[in-house]
Image: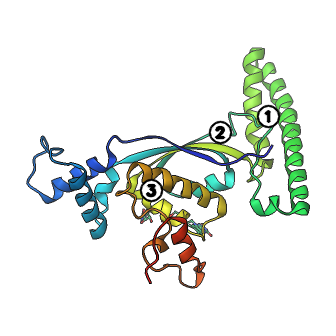
Amino acid sequence: MKTCLKISLLSHSPEPEKIIAAAAKLCYSNAGTKDILNGLNPEATDKFLNMLISMGHMSPIEHATFTFAAEGVSRSLTHQLVRHRIASYSQKSQRYVREGQFEYIVPPAIAANAAALAVFEQSMLHAQASYDNIADSLKETYLKEYLAAGKNPKAAASAAEKKAIEDARYVLPNACETKIIFTMNARELIHFCRQRSCERAQWEIREMSEKMVAQLKAIAPTLFQLAGPPCLYAPCPEGAMSCGKTNEKRAQYGVISQK
Ligand SMILES: Cc1cc2nc3c(=O)[nH]c(=O)nc-3n(C[C@H](O)[C@H](O)[C@H](O)COP(=O)(O)OP(=O)(O)OC[C@H]3O[C@@H](n4cnc5c(N)ncnc54)[C@H](O)[C@@H]3O)c2cc1C
């Protein structure tokens, strides 16, 4: 079965911009910790945030964290996502959860090409059949072993199933749908969204990153002013690898191009 990407912001630090402004205020003023939040109205908060961002003093920005839940994404996407090291991840396990009728992500270029789509769908069916076959066969072998070793039938069946699916999953494709919850601090999120909203990132993680940017800007617009592809506010840093779509990207994010 085909599926589509969903990404939701599950939770975030309370008043993320204010807590970062408090950290900046502590660095640059005589304020004590007891009254550090006093006077941090929206204007003062924005001023501290803009100062940090313009100076590139990014460590205070690490005090705010955001937790996202993604589903309807491929294992290809999560493989790219988990390369971002300053984060915490919890992903649906293929060792513990049987892929009874696995869902899969179809790349748009394949969906738009009837011949490629037919091969792709055939390949998904084949992978499911191979997985079921291997899982059933291994399970039977393990079950016999566990029963012979004296395990009770219920425990033996459960242990045999787990042991079987952890190896059967090796035939599953990168397209296989997965779910993941991840937490990043704001500094890492800005970095992630700059890399992964760029046209050079693959379409799936780019789509997720673009949705994250919209959700983050709705909560903390000053903090996430630089989230999104780097070409929004400066010349594209990609050199010969540039997609050449700076104006399109700026239009997409509602940023007015400088003439
Ligand atoms: C378009 C694109 C193409 C890619 N192609 C490939 C590819 O072909 N092959 C491949 O293997 N990967 C590829 N990647 C993944 C890429 O190499 C990075 O692993 C990934 O984007 C994570 O970025 P990062 O290392 O900057 O940041 P994160 O892990 O998100 O860390 C954030 C920042 O923290 C700092 N940091 C984190 N860990 C360390 C550390 N151990 N030492 C010092 N500083 C650290 C760095 O400043 C880093 O930029 C690609 C990524 C993109 C966006």
Please name the amino acid that badge 2 sits on. Ser
Location of residue 77 in the rendering, given as x and y in whole percent from the top left corner: 64, 55
Q: Which of 149 and 217 is in front in this view?
A: 217
Q: Is residue 164 above or below residue 215?
A: above
Location of residue 99 in the rendering, given as x and y in whole percent from the top left corner: 76, 37
**Horizontal side of residue 122 vs 9, given as left or right:** right
- Mark found first going from the N terminus, 3 or 2: 2
Q: Is residue 176 above or below residue 109?
A: above
Q: Are marks 3 and 2 in contact (CB under 8 Å)?
A: no
Please name the amino acid that badge 3 sits on. Leu
Which residue was labeled with disc 3?
189
Name which residue lies at 59% across and 80% down: 244
**Horizontal side of residue 23 vs 226, given as left or right:** left
Looking at the rendered image, the disc whose residue lies closer to the viewer, 3 or 2, is 3
Which residue was labeled with disc 2?
93
Name which residue lies at 16% across and 53% down: 26
Secondary element at image label 1: loop
Looking at the rendered image, the disc whose residue lies closer to the viewer, 2 or 1, is 1
Cα separation between marks 3 and 2: 24 Å
Which residue was labeled with disc 1?
100
Instruction: Residue 91: name its quadrant.
Output: top right
Quadrant occupied by the N terminus: top right
**Horizontal side of residue 159 vs 90, given as left or right:** right
Specify few, some or many for label 3: CA neighbours under 10 Å numbering under 14, 14-19, or 20 or more: many
Specify few, some or many for label 2: CA neighbours under 10 Å numbering under 14, 14-19, or 20 or more: few
Q: In this view, does 199 lie above or below 25?
A: below
Cα separation between marks 2 and 1: 13 Å
Q: Which of 205 and 45 is in front in this view?
A: 45
- Mark found first going from the N terminus, 2 or 1: 2
Q: Is mark 3 within 8 Å of ligand 1?
A: no
| Residue farthest top in this picture | 152
